[in-house]
Structure formats: C-alpha cells, structure tokens
Image (cartoon, helix red, strand yellow):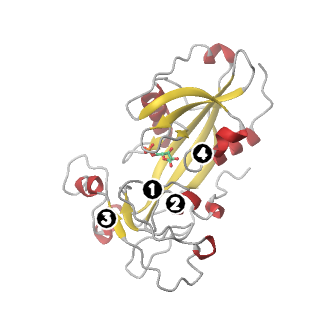
Amino acid sequence: MDAAATLESLVNLKARTESPQGYSRTWVPAEKVAWATAFEGYAPATYTAPQVLENDRSVRPGGWADEADHVKAFARRGAPRSLTSRPIHLDALGRPLNPAGRTGLMGRGLLGKWGPNFAADPIVTRLNPHSGALEMLAIRRKDNGQWAIPGGMVDFGEDVSATLAREFEEETGVTLDMADATLVYLGYVDDPRNTDHAWIESTVKHKHLEPGIASKVEPVAGDDAAAVQWLPLTESNLATLHASHGEFVRRALAARQPLTR
Ligand code: RP5
C-alpha cells in the first residue's frame, strides 16, 4: 500500500461542514471545493484564534505558532513543505493554499502554522480477551466530543516517532515503544480546524498488541482526553471517528496480517 496516498479526495468534508468555536465558514458546495474550479464571489471571513496569535514564537518564548505575517514566518523557517513532497501552491498574497481545496475560511483558525501543521497518530489495537473483537485504544476528544486515535501535534524540532509515543502516553497514560509500529499513512487530514491557509498532515502508525502485552495495559485518560477506552472497530464506530481517523484505521486493518488470539 502507498502510505502517502492522499485523502484529499474526501474534498474537505469535515473541514467544510464542522466549525469549531470562532469559525464562521462560508458554505462551499462539493463541486466548488477544487481551486481549479471557478467560484465567483468566493470571499470567506479571515480568522486566526487569539491563542494562536498569543503564541507567536517570535515574541513569546516557547510559543508554538508562526508569526501573524506569513512572509516573516517563511523567512525564519523556510517555505512550507508537505509530508507528501507534493508542491504547495501559494495564493496571490503568498499564503499557502490548502491542497484539498476550499474550506470556507481564510487565516489559520486554531492552527499555529501557515500551511501544513504536523501531527502523529498511533493506532494501537488488541483482540478483546473475552469476545475476540478487534479493538483500538481510543480517546474521547474534549474539543468536539468525538472518539479519536490518541494523536497530537509534533513539537518544533521533535522527531515524529517520539511524538507518537509521547502523545500516546499523555492521552492514555500507557507507555509504549512505537519504534516497531507499521507506517500506514502519511499526508493530509480532513480535520475540522483546517482552513484555506492552514491544515493538518499526519504520520499514522499501527501497532497490534499481543495478549500478554495487552493484558498489562491500564489506560487512564490524560488532561486532553475526556475518556479513554478499548473501542470495538465496528463500521459504525469507524464512521463517527474524529477527522480522517476512520479512514486511517481502515488502512491499518487492510495492511495487517491475519490476527490470532
Ligand atoms: C487530528 O488532530 C490529527 O490526526 C491528530 O490526531 C490531532 C492533533 O491535534 P490535537 O489532538 O493535538 O488537538 O486531526
């Protein structure tokens, strides 16, 4: 399987139809999502959340966001580059354009960086010791109440394999070596926070726990999670996972070897 195969074909379903607090999206019909398709009068609002502006790392030590001025940000850290190695196109003002097309909102919204914001998503599965059902250790997100892979954002300068293990531990309380996990996806995430100028790209890895290891796992929800549990990977659960997480799990399961109890 091509781990870098993109999910841009989802035409920003969640990035057009879900609006976190502060977002006021212009409606973009599916057939007008592609930048190559003319959309006369398309002039959505511009929004960058106050907490993003407060975390401008050029003025705040330890800040996690770019400067408000994208030209200054790129002068400091270089032009934005995608995990997929595909070129990132710029608009007339030099702002990076969402590779999946229009979202109905300009600016960075809740995302710190102009262009791609890198995340890491650890999919950890087991077979239920009683029912034999395949399950994933999942968290319920505090921001939208949806079940999700316990992933998170890559810190400045952090190695992505360190992010996978760190986020998994922060969200679930479980320490796990992710070095031998299998890469299942690399690229665009249809996240509700995406805008025309800022979006999430993730490195997704899968690790299946054998019964001896899985039985020792004692999950506890971290500060960022409302709840944590072994979630049965039924079609209905996959369909309601946060962002593109259902598709990530489908890809992980399609790539796996047959599992034994
Ligand atoms: C998702 O948001 C990514 O796939 C990742 O799971 C997550 C990162 O954002 P936070 O959990 O840090 O808010 O789209």
The residue shown at (42%, 39%) is 142
Measured Cα–Cα span from mark 2 to mark 1: 7 Å
Q: Residues within 10 Å of mark 2 (few under 14, many from 20)?
A: many
- Residue occupied by mark 1: 193
Ligand 1 within 8 angstroms of badge 1 C-beta: yes
Ligand 1 within 8 angstroms of badge 2 C-beta: no
Q: Quadrant of residue 30?
A: bottom right
Instruction: Mark 4 or mark 3: name the one nearer the start of the chain.
Output: 3
Residue 26 lies, with reference to residue 207, above or below; the image says below
Hey, what amino acid is under mark 3? Answer: Ala
Instruction: Please name which of the two marks, 4 or 2, marks the residue nearer to the observer.
Output: 2
The residue shown at (53%, 60%) is 17
Q: Position of residue 181 (x, y in %)?
A: 62, 34
Residue 1 lies, with reference to residue 231, above or below; the image says below
- Residue occupied by mark 4: 245
Hey, what amino acid is under mark 2? Answer: Ala
Q: In front: 252, or 233?
A: 233
- Disc marking residue 15: 2
Instruction: Mark 2 or mark 3: name the one nearer the start of the chain.
Output: 2
The reply to whether the C-beta atoms of the residues labelled 2 and 1 are less than 8 Å apart is: yes
Tell me the element at label 3: helix
Ligand 1 within 8 angstroms of badge 4 C-beta: yes
The residue shown at (51%, 86%) is 40
- Disc marking residue 73: 3
Instruction: Please name which of the two marks, 2 or 3, marks the residue nearer to the observer.
Output: 2
Q: In this image, 202 relative to 125: left or right?
A: left
Instruction: Mark 1 or mark 3: name the one nearer the start of the chain.
Output: 3
